[in-house]
Image (tube, rainbow, N blue to C red):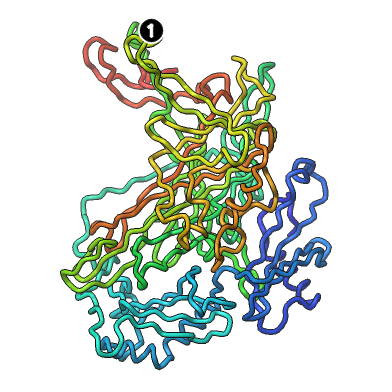
Amino acid sequence: MSAVHPLSLLTPEEVTTAREVLDGAGELPEGCSIAHILLAEPAKDELAAWRPGDPVERRVKALVVPGPELTMVELLVSVTRREVVGRRVIEGMRPALLMGESFMVMVACSEHPEYRAALERRGITDLTHVQIDPWPAGSFGYGVEEGRRIARCISFLRETADDNGYARPIEGLIVHADLGTGEVLEVIDHAPPGTDPVPLAPQGARYTSEHVGPLRADLRPISILQPDGPSFTVEDNLVRWQKWSLRLGWDPYEGLVLHQVTYTDTAPDGSERERSVLHRASISEMVVPYGDPGEVQGWKNAFDAGEWGLGRMTQSLTLGCDCLGVIHYTDVTMATEQGEPWVVPNAVCMHEEDYGIGWKHVDLQTGRAEVRRSRRLVISHIATVGNYEYGFFWYLYLDGNIQLEVKLTGILSTQGLPVGGESPFANPIAPGLAAPVHQHMFCARLDLDVDGTRNRVEEVEAETLPMGPDNPWGNAFRPRVTVLERESTAQRDTDPRTSRAWRVVNPDQLNHVGRPVGYKLVPTMATPTLLAHPESSVGRRAGFARHNLWVTPYHPDEQRAAGDFPNQHEGGAGLPEWTAQDRDLDGTDVVLWYTFGVTHLPRPEDWPVMPVEYTGFLLVPYGFFERNPALDVPPSPAGPCHVPGGSGDGADVGAGSDAGCCGG
């Protein structure tokens, strides 16, 4: 199957071809692993020059891990020409955790005599249902970290195979294992012989329907019907909905990617014009730092994109459960660690949602009501990273808004405590069980091209004026606009007190009131920055989370906020390193990096499975249009309703009345 566009989704045939080319070139030594095979996206100028009907050369990047050493080989393969066209040896870095290696160390742990002895001291002699979770190790100066790819393994006890293991952490037992060789390096037991280990929590915490007691019997079905089908079309990976157009992309680490997002509106001369908004949007990185400083919990700092892979951890979605309505699903292709095609069916869900009132006004002189319903296109995927689930929902609206909402759910990372015991860094959630405080910090990479690539970033916030002759009643406030001219001044934090937001404008394109067209990045809720000290291990490694906003000039090699290889990295890579150049931003092709998230202070209601918690942001047109772009949304067929004063007798007014609810 040949691609029809340079950004078409990777196909199984392309993965197979890439592996054959690599094998034929002698680049797959015996015992190697392939960390990824992913689409090599063309440079921006190549994409801009490409036209339908032009030939498409498809290239992929492959990352080969030859053996246990800290050496990787990155290869660029033209699957069109069936040849290796680039090769780079990477020394001293580590790939994301590999699934095959993780399974290997789980087996090694379960067979190690010191580990088994530590379990026996806790009364565990049958390892059938012992759950071993390998975690990214971080960088803490342990001797075993030097020159190795390691995991720190923690353990839980299930009663049965389908039990919730996180209800019974085997507290204080940590195993350091070499991912490359599969050997156990050391078993650390914080309850050594002669001391009493923390007992297992006394009760389980199953959450499946057959174990939670009587289910509610009074929920009536909700049906979403679109008898004429959805309002969007999908051809290859090109999505068109209303006046929006975009291409779906996929990355093993970022997951869902939006490419070439445009909006078609009417030019002043009456012609239609397709206008660029976003060149590329994705979750570049995320980190989950824990707040307990002790040796048992304090090393937990997982980079769920760079160390695990939000794309690699994505799940197939199910109609009626994950998605509701008239659904279009998209399968995605990645590669196994042996270089074979790995297809995840129904990885991306797309559907429309009614979203309440879009706009409304009742003319009090005539009694006429005009209402338009809002609607949004939803594009989503859900990743399961260990105990947590992350749902990523991109919304496109009829009024030109773009929103990303992240939904966090799943199971808390737990800590065993003696019944009645307490920790200042964890909240109790069940008898003998606590959950450490932690954060979830996401970094979205937003390559905005607002009516072109020459853009400027402005910080906009409300400024109050002091009492005086110009403000005699003390009520005055006004917008204050600050141009972010260089990288050093474009490291900014949210401030809900002043409604701080950031506007990307095109100084070369003026709207009908003489102002540059623009889009504004709006925090949708108060969002934290990293609470760990900047010189802490995670503070150095997750430098992107020190600020909510960073701005850089576009560079094709700057894709991951914490650098390409955060696993066991000492820190400083990514945004802190790039922005140290202090490059000029005004009137350039800018990229916004927005860090947002939640600080989680767990509560009993988060157990045994956490209700969804929400975070995200909004992109809002700001002078991009000459008027409300949803004015042309047609009225909905009005059902029976009541318009006070509309008929004079308080009667219900039907769809055929002059006072119909929706106008038109």
Q: Quadrant for residue 486, please give it.
A: top right
Quadrant containing the C terminus is top left
Residue 167: x and y in percent read 28, 71
Query: Looking at this view, is 295 or 226 the one in front?
Result: 295
Q: Is residue 153 above or below residue 11?
A: below
Position above or below: 280 against 313: above
The x, y position of residue 420, in whole percent, is 16, 69
Q: Quadrant of residue 408?
A: bottom left
Within the image, what quadrant is residue 652 found in? top left
Q: Which residue is mark 1?
A: 469
Q: Residues within 10 Å of mark 1 (few under 14, many from 20)?
A: few
Identify the residue at the far left of this view.
Answer: 420
**Residue 87 in the figure: left or right of residue 562:** right
- Rendered residue at 65%/28% (across/down): 506
Q: Is residue 176 left or right of residue 294?
A: right
- Nearer the observer, 378 or 389: 389
- The amino acid type, in three-letter code, at marker 1 is Pro
Q: Give above or below for 563 relative to 422.
A: above
Residue 445 vs 213, above or below: the answer is: above
Q: Nearer the viewer, residue 568 or 448?
A: 568
Q: Nearer the viewer, residue 144 or 360?
A: 144
Q: Residue furthest bottom?
A: 113
Q: Is residue 140 visible?
A: yes
Q: Residue at x 71, y 71 (%)?
A: 73
- Residue at the spot x=29%, y=12% of the render? 646
Q: Position of residue 444 (x, y in %)?
A: 53, 48
Q: Secondary structure at mark 1?
A: loop
Residue 338: give x, y in percent of width and height. 64, 76
